[in-house]
Image: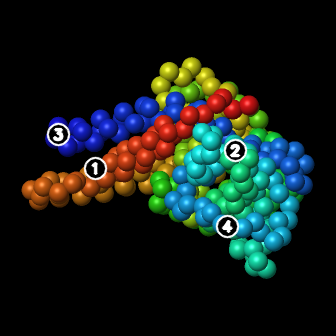
């Protein structure tokens, strides 16, 4: 095997092996207070998405003139974004004001009041982070979420609330509009049915289908449907897992299961076509004799770089155990 290929794969494997123990220590987002009927836990995808969003929040000098209703949001992001004071990091809980007004102007994004050693800081959220928090607040105060929604429940409620969320197979193969509409119709009908489900930690490739959901704020989340278990069950990466795991998931109706069987067959065909295309491209490039970085190396290298940045950020945090 080419030395470059060995180096990239080794780096990617090593970082993937380290990532889960580090990230597993981070608590999920949590929302409470204001006019929410009860506290609501965010999903892991939204917790990590909130941490990893590209654009930084902006520090503003003065508090807003009109705050509106505030909501407590638990996140380690506040401690990463703000400087330490007297050797202390920002409190894990900050107050989110989705409808605050700045000098007579609504900024279109929520503001956050965070504290470090009793000193207050005001943050104007970037569009992606604001979209994540705003979704929970809007759906939560309208009573559309349970205390611990899974990803399907959250996004089905968002679609019911009026958001447009696309559905794709194999990352870049859009699901036809008719099937996407049927998917959301069945998902909305299943609202309130999520529960703790026990299922195998190791599922063969042919027994599940992964859907990529395209969110309006410009990010994506993946959901996994396990055919044999007839449920949307989150995948747990990493080694050393027991034979079965228990996590919150959403069981499928017979109609949803039939749709997912159809999408599973289409997904398998899409992956086969991509693999065939990749092999053909690789065979063509093999005769070029170029010394540049091969195309196959870009995805693992990008993954390794992203994980390295995330691990470095997490390594700088000296956190107490969350209460």
Q: Earlier in the sequence, mark 1 or mark 4?
A: 4
Q: What residue does disc 4 label?
A: 61
Q: What residue does disc 3 label?
A: 3
- Asked if 170 appears above or below 22 in the picture, the reply is below
Q: Earlier in the sequence, mark 2 or mark 4?
A: 4
Residue at coordinates 90% horizontally, 55% vertically from top-left?
35
Q: CA distance from mark 1 to mark 2?
A: 46 Å
Residue at coordinates 54% horizontally, 62% vertically from top-left?
55
Residue at coordinates 60% horizontally, 61% vertically from top-left?
57
Residue 87 spot, x, y in % from top left: 60, 39
**Disc 3 and disc 2 in contact, CB within 8 angstroms:** no
Q: What residue does disc 2 label?
A: 117
Label 3 or label 2, whichever lies nearer to me, is 2
Mark 4 Cα within 10 Å, few/some/many (few <14, many 20+)?
few
Query: Seen in the image, is 14 located left or right of residue 174?
Result: left
**Is residue 261 visible to us here?**
no
Q: Image quarter for residue 224?
A: top right
Q: Earlier in the sequence, mark 3 or mark 1?
A: 3
Label 4 or label 3, whichever lies nearer to me, is 4
Name the quadrant of the C terminus: top right
Helix, strand or loop at mark 3 = helix
Name the quadrant of the N terminus: top left
Q: CA distance from mark 1 to mark 4?
A: 45 Å
Q: What residue does disc 1 label?
A: 297
**Disc 4 and disc 3 in contact, CB within 8 angstroms:** no
In front of the other: 63 or 249: 63
Mark 2 Cα within 10 Å, few/some/many (few <14, many 20+)?
few
Label 1 or label 2, whichever lies nearer to me, is 2
Q: Earlier in the sequence, mark 3 or mark 2?
A: 3
């Amino acid at each position: 095997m080419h030395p470059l290929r060995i180096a990239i794969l080794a780096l990617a494997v090593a970082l993937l092996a380290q990532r889960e123990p580090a990230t597993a220590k981070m608590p999920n987002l949590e929302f409470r207070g204001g006019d929410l009927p009860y506290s609501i836990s965010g999903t892991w995808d939204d917790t990590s998405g909130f941490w990893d969003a590209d654009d930084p929040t902006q520090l503003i000098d003065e508090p807003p003139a009109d705050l509106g209703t505030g909501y407590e949001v638990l996140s380690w992001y506040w401690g990463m974004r703000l400087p330490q004071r007297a050797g202390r990091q920002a409190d894990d809980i900050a107050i989110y004001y989705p409808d605050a007004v700045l000098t007579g102007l609504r900024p279109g994004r929520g503001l956050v009041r965070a504290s470090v050693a009793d000193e207050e800081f005001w943050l104007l959220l970037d569009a992606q982070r604001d979209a994540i928090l705003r979704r929970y607040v809007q759906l939560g105060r309208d009573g559309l979420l349970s205390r611990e929604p899974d990803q399907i429940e959250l996004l089905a409620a968002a679609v019911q609330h009026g958001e447009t969320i696309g559905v794709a197979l194999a990352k870049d193969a859009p699901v036809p509009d008719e099937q996407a509409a049927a998917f959301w119709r069945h998902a909305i009908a299943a609202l309130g049915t999520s529960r703790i489900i026990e299922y195998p930690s190791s599922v063969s490739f042919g027994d599940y289908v992964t859907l990529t959901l395209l969110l309006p704020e410009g990010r994506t989340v993946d959901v996994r449907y396990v055919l044999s278990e007839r449920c949307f069950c989150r995948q747990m990466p990493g080694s050393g897992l027991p034979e079965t795991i228990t996590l919150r998931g959403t069981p499928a109706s017979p109609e949803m299961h039939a749709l997912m069987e159809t999408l599973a067959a289409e997904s398998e065909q899409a992956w086969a076509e991509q693999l065939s295309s990749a092999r053909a491209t690789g065979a063509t490039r093999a005769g070029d004799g170029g010394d540049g970085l091969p195309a196959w190396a870009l995805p693992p290298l990008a993954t390794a770089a992203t994980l390295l940045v995330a691990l470095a950020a997490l390594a700088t945090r000296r956190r107490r155990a969350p209460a």
